[in-house]
């Protein structure tokens, strides 16, 4: 087949599946983007002839390596580490590092693929990457985590750099783990440079980085509601997760006059009909971060709440929903339940938390639905601002960063409207985000020729 021949969506996806067997998460991520991109590309011969989508769906490289470390009992442990560098057409690879037993090459390839478009949407010069390990930090001592992070970085350091690839934190990787990895990078290279983001404020970090993803998801939600002449004032919200993103999303909703009803973790969810106030959010932050506790213990501190073991919160009636936990946590049936219960808007705070059936359900119902690559871009946006501060050897004030975050989320929202306005008052934010992100990366790739 000549390179100028056009394949249809089904033919393209068959090729993706054949090239990536046993990688369902990656195939799902490509499918979700390709469904919108194929229509957009119909009359754009250069994208077809230069095989742009095919090239974006093939990572620049996938680095896999062994991570050996010693536990406190003196046992030698072996994990696997990866760094997926998907695309650097518009800037250095940028994306988090995840430590969790569920980490596989497929999960990291999907995350790096999504990250490519998310980073493009921010308007900042960042490519897409992702990394991690199947190491589980839960139940490990601080010394064990330190030894693992140092061993992980001893291999990773040769593949990253301030102008090459700048990792950040993700699930299982917070400020402590970033500190251990940055210390090892500095030790090996004798180089103090902005090679990681999410650093401590004392050594190159940025204000509001911790809050940015959760706040950004709510800013995007507020922008969507504003298109209908509405605000978050008085609206009920269902949130999944109870980590960094979920608690800060809850915090911002409370600040904007909304009422948060739920939080969750892998054990189940809590439902607080009185509303999860700022005082209660602060309790959750302390409980989860410092005590490493479980969300079910919330009901002992606040007895009017109930805990629902092994369940997700999507059956609780609400005005808005924010999935902020992990991929594929909101399924097709959950989406139907939310719509049937009158949910007006969904803003994703995690990466691909809604499966394809759920996405199609939200789109068919024409509710306000923001995909993660748009609505949870606040975290990487502030990471990009941290990179800029590191390059300039300076720090911006909190008010400046808050305004920049609001402006970036508003800019992403405007890009989604530009390419997703379907007329009749309906905006397909999934389509808008996919096309806006794709176009920026694709046009840069065209400028470089076949590389």
Image (cartoon, rainbow, N blue to C red):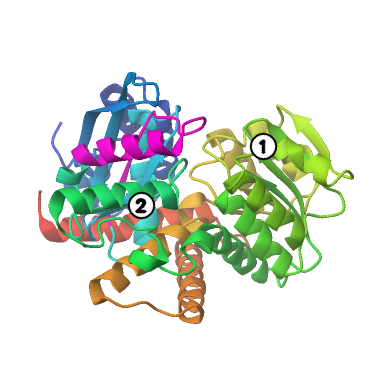
* Marker disc for residue 179: 2
Q: Is disc 1 placed on a helix, strand or loop?
A: loop
Could you tell whether 161 is left or right of 213 in the image?
left
- From this view, report whether residue 8 is shown above or below residue 259: above
Task: Note whether residue 226 is visible.
Answer: yes
Q: Position of residue 320 (x, y in %)?
A: 71, 54
Residue sitting at 42 percent across and 49 percent down? Answer: 176
Upstream in the sequence, badge 1 or badge 2?
Answer: 2
Q: Position of residue 19 (x, y in %)?
A: 26, 25
Q: Which quadrant, please, contains the N terminus?
A: top left
Per the model, the C-alpha gap separating discs 1 and 2 is 25 Å
Task: Note whether residue 128 is visible.
Answer: no
Q: Position of residue 146 (x, y in %)?
A: 36, 40
Residue sitting at 81 percent across and 45 percent down? Answer: 301
Q: Is residue 152 magenta?
A: yes
Q: Position of residue 182 (x, y in %)?
A: 29, 52
Could you tell whether 193 is left or right of 418 in the image?
left
Residue range highlighted in magenta: 127-155
Q: Residues within 10 Å of mark 2 (few under 14, many from 20)?
A: many
Q: Please identify the quarter of the rendering in which residue 218 is found.
A: bottom right
* Marker disc for residue 294: 1
């Amino acid at each position: 087949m000549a390179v100028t021949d056009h394949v249809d969506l089904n033919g393209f996806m068959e090729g993706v599946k054949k090239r990536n067997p046993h990688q369902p998460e990656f195939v799902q991520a490509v499918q979700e983007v390709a469904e919108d991109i194929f229509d957009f590309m119909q009359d754009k011969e250069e994208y077809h002839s230069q095989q742009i989508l095919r090239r974006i769906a093939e990572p620049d490289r996938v680095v896999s390596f062994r991570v050996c470390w010693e536990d406190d009992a003196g046992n030698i442990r072996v994990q696997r580490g990866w760094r997926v560098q998907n695309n650097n057409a518009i800037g250095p690879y940028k994306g988090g590092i995840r430590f969790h037993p569920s980490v596989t090459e497929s999960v990291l390839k999907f995350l790096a693929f999504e990250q490519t478009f998310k980073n493009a949407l921010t308007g900042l010069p960042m490519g897409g990457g992702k990394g991690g390990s199947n190491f589980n930090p839960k139940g490990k001592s601080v010394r064990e985590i330190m030894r693992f992070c140092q061993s992980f970085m001893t291999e990773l350091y040769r593949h990253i750099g301030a102008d090459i690839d700048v990792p950040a934190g993700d699930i299982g990787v917070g400020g402590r783990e970033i500190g251990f990895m940055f210390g090892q990078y500095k030790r090996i290279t004798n180089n103090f440079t902005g090679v990681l983001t999410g650093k401590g404020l004392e050594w190159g970090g940025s204000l509001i980085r911790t809050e940015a993803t959760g706040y950004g998801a709510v800013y995007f939600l507020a922008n969507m509601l504003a298109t209908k002449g509405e605000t978050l004032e008085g609206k009920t919200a269902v949130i999944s997760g109870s980590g960094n993103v979920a608690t800060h999303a809850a915090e911002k909703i409370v600040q904007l006059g909304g009422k948060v009803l739920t939080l969750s973790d892998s054990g189940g969810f809590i439902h607080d009909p009185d509303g999860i106030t700022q005082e209660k959010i602060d309790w959750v932050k302390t409980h989860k971060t410092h005590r490493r506790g479980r969300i079910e213990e919330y009901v002992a501190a606040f007895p009017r709440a109930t805990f629902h073991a092994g369940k997700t919160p999507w059956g609780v009636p609400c005005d808005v929903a924010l999935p902020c936990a992990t991929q594929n946590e909101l399924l097709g049936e959950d989406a139907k339940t939310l719509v049937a219960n009158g949910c007006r808007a969904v803003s994703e705070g995690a990466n691909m938390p809604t499966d394809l059936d759920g996405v199609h359900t939200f789109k068919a119902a024409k509710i306000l639905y923001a995909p993660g690559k748009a609505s949870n871009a606040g975290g990487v946006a502030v990471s990009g601002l941290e990179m800029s501060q590191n390059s300039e050897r300076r720090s911006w004030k909190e008010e400046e960063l808050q305004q920049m975050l609001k402006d970036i989320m508003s800019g992403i929202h405007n890009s989604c409207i530009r390419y997703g306005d379907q007329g009749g008052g309906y905006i397909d934010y999934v389509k808008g985000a996919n096309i806006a992100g794709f176009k920026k990366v694709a046009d840069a790739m065209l400028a470089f020729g076949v590389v």
